[in-house]
Amino acid sequence: MHGTIRSLPFPGRLGVICLCLVLLGGLVASAFYLYQHHEKKDEQPGLTLIDLQGAYHGVDNPSLLLKALNAGHPETLKAEQRSALKAWLEGTRIVEDYDNLDLGDNAPSEIIAANCVSCHARNASDPVAKKIPLDYFDDVKKIAFSRRINPVPAPILLVSTHAHALALGCVFFVIGVLMLATSWPRIMRQWLPSLALLGLFIDLGAWWLSRYAIEFVYVIIVAGGAFNVLGVLCLLCVIIDALRPGKASPQA
């Protein structure tokens, strides 16, 4: 099959190029879908590691303020006030109870004003603490909300695995055949599609393994990224080969 694409007449080459462009568009659309589908799982703009960890493993990420309280900061805070703040942050009325008059001196706004703002203020002398101001509720709420993300339910993941395995496996069978029909060096023709499929296999396997160990999310990122990059590279190689000057197909 070596060099077959370059020996095709113009209509055949045009068809190959259009097919590759369609598949490239599909890969790009898939990447955008992944971005949009996962980017707001942590309720923050942009796709982050926490988004992916939440989708595949699940994340229970306490707020920065709750982490500080659990770590014993500030040291001078009374036990009763620390418990009141923790109960507020672990509850479901963070906005409503911030300055709730019914809570009296145990209202979070009162506790924070009396124990935290002296250091965590925009005009504070502590250069580190002033980077996290707590003067107003708009400041406090940025570090008050914990993030809990449940992983994709197993039945949905099973359906997604089924669809991706069959669809992408068939797509890359086509891409592999097209690569074998190019005139690129044998190592490129054989190894690029093979490595892409290896990345797909590892990626899909890591979807399930990451449910038990969060470290496999990094495997998903690396293997899935390699699969997509190699897929794009294969399609570009086929397009370039179809645009090169024609020649008679040599013996394989």
Image (cartoon, grey):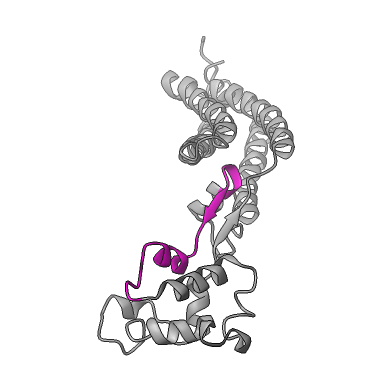
**Image location of residue 115, percent across then percent down:** 38, 82
Please check the rendered image and state whether residue 67 is part of the magenta-colored stretch, yes or no.
Answer: yes
**Image location of residue 89, percent across then percent down:** 54, 69
Residues in magenta? 54-76
Q: Quadrant of residue 177?
A: top right
Q: Is residue 50 above or below residue 237?
A: below
67 vs 50, nearest the viewer: 67
**Image location of residue 150, percent across then percent down:** 63, 49
Q: In which quarter of the image is residue 71?
A: bottom left
Q: In this view, does 98 lie to the left or right of 37?
A: left
Locate the N terminus by quadrant.
Answer: top right
202 vs 83, nearest the viewer: 83
Q: Is residue 116 above or below residue 217?
A: below
| Residue lying furthest top | 251
Residue ID at (52%, 80%)? 108
Residue ID at (48%, 71%)? 143
Residue ID at (59%, 56%)? 148
146 vs 230, nearest the viewer: 146
Q: In this view, does 134 lie above or below 26?
A: below
Please check the rendered image and state whether residue 201 is part of the magenta-colored stretch, yes or no.
Answer: no
**Image location of residue 50, percent across then percent down:** 51, 53
